[in-house]
Structures are given as C-alpha cells and as structure tokens.
Image (spheres, rainbow, N blue to C red):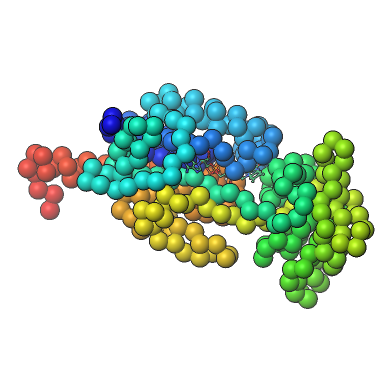
C-alpha cells in the first residue's frame, strides 16, 4: 500500500474544515482534506447572514473555498471516511488503497438533521421548511409562518419569528407548553394551535401550501420553522476514544476553546461539536482551530529541533 504523510488530515470539507485548511495551508503545512460532499445546508439554494456572501449558494461558497485552499497546496479529495486509527507515526486513514498518516487529525464533519416524523415535511426541508430565523426568516417576513414545536427552543424560535411577521402559528403537536410560555406567545399575538399535525401539504408544483391537522382542518401557511434533532457525524471521533458531554439532550464530543478533544492530537471544529447553526460560526471555529493546530505543531517542531540539535529547553 502507498503511504503519504501529512502535517494535518482534515475530515470534512465544509465551512469549518476548509477554514481550518486555509489557516494551515497558509502556514505551509501539508494538509489533506477528505470530504464526502454533503454539507448540512446543501438543501438550500441560497444562504443568508453570511457577510460579503449573503444570498450565495452554499455549494458555490464551498467550491470557492476549495479553490482558495488549493492555492496554498492543500489537497482536497472526495472520500467518506468511516474509520481512523492512531499508531506510532500519527493518525492513520486508508482511502482507496492509500495509507494517509497525519501528525494531527481535525474532524469537521458537521451534523445531520433528524426531522420530526411528519409526512410531507422532509420534502420541504431547505425550501418551505427551515431551522434558522436568521438564515431564512427575512425571506418570509410578513408571511404566514408556522412553528412546529419540536424541541425546547421552539417557543424561543416562535418569539424570534414574531419579530418578522404578525402571522405566526405555534403548532403544539402534543409537546409540553408551559403556562408561562403560552402566555408569552399569546401576549405577542401568536396563535397557539393545540390540535395535532397530520401532514404538511404542498401545491401541485411541490411548494409548501399548508398544514393539515388530524381532524382534517387545513391551515394555509407559507413557511415552517422547526428544530430538527442534530445528530453529530462523530463516528470517527468516538472510535478514537474522544469523550462526550451532554447539551440539550444531545451527546456532543467535548472540546476545549481551542478545539482539542480528550485525545491528544485529535481536534474538532464546527457543527460536529456545536449546535450553533451558521456558516460564519462554523468558519470562525475552523479558522481558530486551524491556527491552534498550527501552534501545536510549532511547539512540537521546537521540541524536535531542540532534541535533534542537543539543545536543552529546560
Ligand atoms: C436547510 C439549512 C439551511 C441553512 N442555511 C443557512 C444560512 O442561510 N446561513 C447560515 O449561516 N447557515 C445556514 N445553515 C447552517 C449551516 O449549514 C451550518 O451551520 C454549517 O454548514 C456548518 O458547517 P460545518 O463545516 O460544521 O458542517 P457542514 O457544512 O455540514 O460540512 C461538513 C462536511 O463534512 C463532510 N462529511 C461528513 N461526514 C464525513 C465523513 N465521514 N467523511 C468525509 N466527509 C464527511 C460532509 O460531506 C460536509 O461536506 C443552514 C442549515 C440548514 C440545515
């Protein structure tokens, strides 16, 4: 098998992984990015709240990012990495018969969104149905907006959207709603719909048109917001022994403020270790962690150089 050595292997070439790659490539590190090509926001034609790139296609942004990192010698390959190991030389990943060895491993594989089991909802994901008011709220301002209760942040989401439209309906759909939360919604003119949801409706072109309730009543709507359950793509991190911490009912691999996991040399950035839902936050995380990995390598380079020259660092 062919062996290739890298300073850093990055699994995941979304905003977090490519931002880290940019920092590392510009630091003249040998960097390999392995990416399966399915960023979280691939369902959306446009992204918003991204300064300088507001309204761009998310896939165009990443294509531009791949071009940018290539200028600094970063190699990006298409691969779905299912396992990695740690040996004497560093982290090891086999892809298509090549044995890649990295001094450091960064995992930036994002999350997948587990939608509530409501018929017709998945077909609208990224078009009529969205998660983030900051990403997709402005586009439906003053329209008929549904909030489908689907997590502890749903009431907050409805209150955020009330900022953008007076026509908000909160579909309780069998979830718990405290008296205080209900009072807050009603006080701001949000309709609270107690009946359960049967299915999401679309017109003949497939565009979202409404929500049908279990008693057959139909509520016309223009947009649905919900909180899917984030499922971190963290199989590689866990297989290497990274410890986790619970936040809002989800076990996240634990990282410090520099992206270090509990495993020496193993880093993580972006949505795979954080519920924060935005491209700039993922980029910022990758940018910071990329710089930290370079600093970590510099420290090791100093130790190695001192050992080679017989200098004492004590
Ligand atoms: C429908 C929708 C719309 C959104 N709209 C916006 C918006 O308008 N503005 C905004 O700021 N944010 C938006 N977001 C949030 C944004 O998508 C995420 O916050 C951001 O993509 C996180 O970046 P990331 O790099 O951490 O993960 P991702 O962008 O998900 O990238 C992870 C990468 O890792 C790869 N990968 C995963 N597993 C493996 C593996 N095993 N091997 C190799 N590669 C792997 C994936 O293919 C992917 O390319 C939206 C989210 C959704 C769901």
- Residue at figure coordinates x 41%, y 40% from the top left: 10
- Residue at figure coordinates x 87%, y 41% from the top left: 203
- Residue 307 screen position, x and y as percent: 11, 43
Q: Is residue 221 left or right of residue 26?
A: right
Can residue 275 be seen at all in this image of the molecule? Answer: yes
Front residue of 279 and 209: 209
- Residue 67 screen position, x and y as percent: 49, 25
Give the vertical position of 155 relative to 257 (above or below).
below
- Residue at figure coordinates x 9%, y 48% from the top left: 312
Which quadrant would residue 182 be assigned to in this image? Answer: bottom right
- Residue 155 screen position, x and y as percent: 73, 63
Which quadrant would residue 6 be assigned to in this image? Answer: top left
Q: Is residue 219 left or right of residue 302?
A: right
Image quadrant holding the N terminus, namely top left
- Residue 40 screen position, x and y as percent: 59, 43
Outermost residue, bottom side: 179
- Residue at figure coordinates x 49%, y 45% from the top left: 109
Can residue 166 be seen at all in this image of the molecule? Answer: no
- Ligand 1 occupies quarter: top right
């Amino acid at each position: 098998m062919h062996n290739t050595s890298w300073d850093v292997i990055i699994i995941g070439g979304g905003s977090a992984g490519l931002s880290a790659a940019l920092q590392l490539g510009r630091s003249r590190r040998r960097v390999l990015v392995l990416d399966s090509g399915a960023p979280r926001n691939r369902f959306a034609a446009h992204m918003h709240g991204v300064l300088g790139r507001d309204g761009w296609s998310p896939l165009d942004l990443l294509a531009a990012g791949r071009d940018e990192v290539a200028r600094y010698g970063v190699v990006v390959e298409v691969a779905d990495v299912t396992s990695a190991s740690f040996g004497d030389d560093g982290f090891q990943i086999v892809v298509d018969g090549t044995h890649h060895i990295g001094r450091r491993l960064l995992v930036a594989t994002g999350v997948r969104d587990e939608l509530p089991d409501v018929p017709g909802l998945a077909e609208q994901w990224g078009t009529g149905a969205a998660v983030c008011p900051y990403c997709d709220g402005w586009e439906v301002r003053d329209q008929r907006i549904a909030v489908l209760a689907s997590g502890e942040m749903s009431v907050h989401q409805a209150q955020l959207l009330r900022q953008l439209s007076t026509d908000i309906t909160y579909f309780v759909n069998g979830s718990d709603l405290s008296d205080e939360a209900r009072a807050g919604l009603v006080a701001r003119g949000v309709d609270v719909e107690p009946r359960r949801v049967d299915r999401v409706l679309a017109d003949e072109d497939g565009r979202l048109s409404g929500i049908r309730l279990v008693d057959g009543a139909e509520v016309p709507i223009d947009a649905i917001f919900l909180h899917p359950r984030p499922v971190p793509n963290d199989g590689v991190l866990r297989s290497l022994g990274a410890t986790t911490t619970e936040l809002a009912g989800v076990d996240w691999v634990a990282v410090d403020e520099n992206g270090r996991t509990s495993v020496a040399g193993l880093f993580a950035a972006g949505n795979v270790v954080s519920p924060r839902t935005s491209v700039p936050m993922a980029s910022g995380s990758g940018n910071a962690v990329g710089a930290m990995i370079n600093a970590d390598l510099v420290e090791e380079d100093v130790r190695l150089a001192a050992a080679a020259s017989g200098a004492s660092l004590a």
